[in-house]
């Protein structure tokens, strides 16, 4: 099965273009003002206007009001949402316009052996209206901070589409895909800091290497 790829935290036109040319299926824009990769919704709309058909813009929100979330989604054609804060299932559903916009829900997996205590099966059931559950490392604040959790501690079977995130790089993404692709309905990957030159500034060679590593993993058992 082909692993779908999202490049997140984009802030520049050239990085959007590189991600698309490399073969990304989705491009992510952070609308959380406290993030070093934050952009305004106006800027996200400008960048997303470069996206061709069948590539999805994804807007990342953290504990945002439902009305503001829907207004932002309406500004960016074809956008989906990614909820990365403390949103409940009901809040995600409300902020998506009761299903008008598709959304991902981030699961913040504790680092180290504490990760075994995270009930991903229940979490996926609680957020069953989400298009997918995005797996990220639980660190101070919001976002994974470039940290990878222990993939081996996840349950062997999760009845959901999963998106692996948190600390991914061209060097380790293949291992992550091989570890998780049989544990869910379908697996995608999401990278931000692992393809950067600095925060919010992507490295074109790293993006291309990341996509190539994903395709190489898809081609092997």
Image: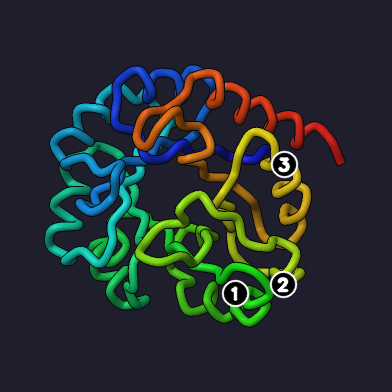
Pointer 2: residues within 10 angstroms few (<14), some, or many (20+)? some
Sequence-wise, which precedes: disc 2 or disc 1? 1
Q: Which residue corresponds to the image point at 58% horizontal and 39% vertical from the top-left?
A: 4
For the C terminus, the image quarter is top right
Read off the residue under disc 2: 155
Q: CA distance from mark 3 to mark 1?
A: 22 Å
- Residue 3 drawn above or below residue 209: below
Read off the residue under disc 3: 1
Sequence-wise, which precedes: disc 3 or disc 1? 3
Q: Secondary structure at mark 1?
A: helix
Q: Which residue corresponds to the image point at 69% horizontal and 69% vertical from the top-left?
A: 154
Sequence-wise, which precedes: disc 2 or disc 3? 3
Residue 16 drawn at (x, y percent): 37, 25
For the N terminus, the image quarter is top right
Image quadrant where residue 42 sits: top left
Residue 120: numbered disc: 1
Q: Which residue corresponds to the image point at 52% horizontal and 59% vertical from the top-left?
A: 136
Q: Are marks 2 and 3 in contact (CB under 8 Å)?
A: no
Q: Is residue 33 left or right of residue 85?
A: left
């Amino acid at each position: 099965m082909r692993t779908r790829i999202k490049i997140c935290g984009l802030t520049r036109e050239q990085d959007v273009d590189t991600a698309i040319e490399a073969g990304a299926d989705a491009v992510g824009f952070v609308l959380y003002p406290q993030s070093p990769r934050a952009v305004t919704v106006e800027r996200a709309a400008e960048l997303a206007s470069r996206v061709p058909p069948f590539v999805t813009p994804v807007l990342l929100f953290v504990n945002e009001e439902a009305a503001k979330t829907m207004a932002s989604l309406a500004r960016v054609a074809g956008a989906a949402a990614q909820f990365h804060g403390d949103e409940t299932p009901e809040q995600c559903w409300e902020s998506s316009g009761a299903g008008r916009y598709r959304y991902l829900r981030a699961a913040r997996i504790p680092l180290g052996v504490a990760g075994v205590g995270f009930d991903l099966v229940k979490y996926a059931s609680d957020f069953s209206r989400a298009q997918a559950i995005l797996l990220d490392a639980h660190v101070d604040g919001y976002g994974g901070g470039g940290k990878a959790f222990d993939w081996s501690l996840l349950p062997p079977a999760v009845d959901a589409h999963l998106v692996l995130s948190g600390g991914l790089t061209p060097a380790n993404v293949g291992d992550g895909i091989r570890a998780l692709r049989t544990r869910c309905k379908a697996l995608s990957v999401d990278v931000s800091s692992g393809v950067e030159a600095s925060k919010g500034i992507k490295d074109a060679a790293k993006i291309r290497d990341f996509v190539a590593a994903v395709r190489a993993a898809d081609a092997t058992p």
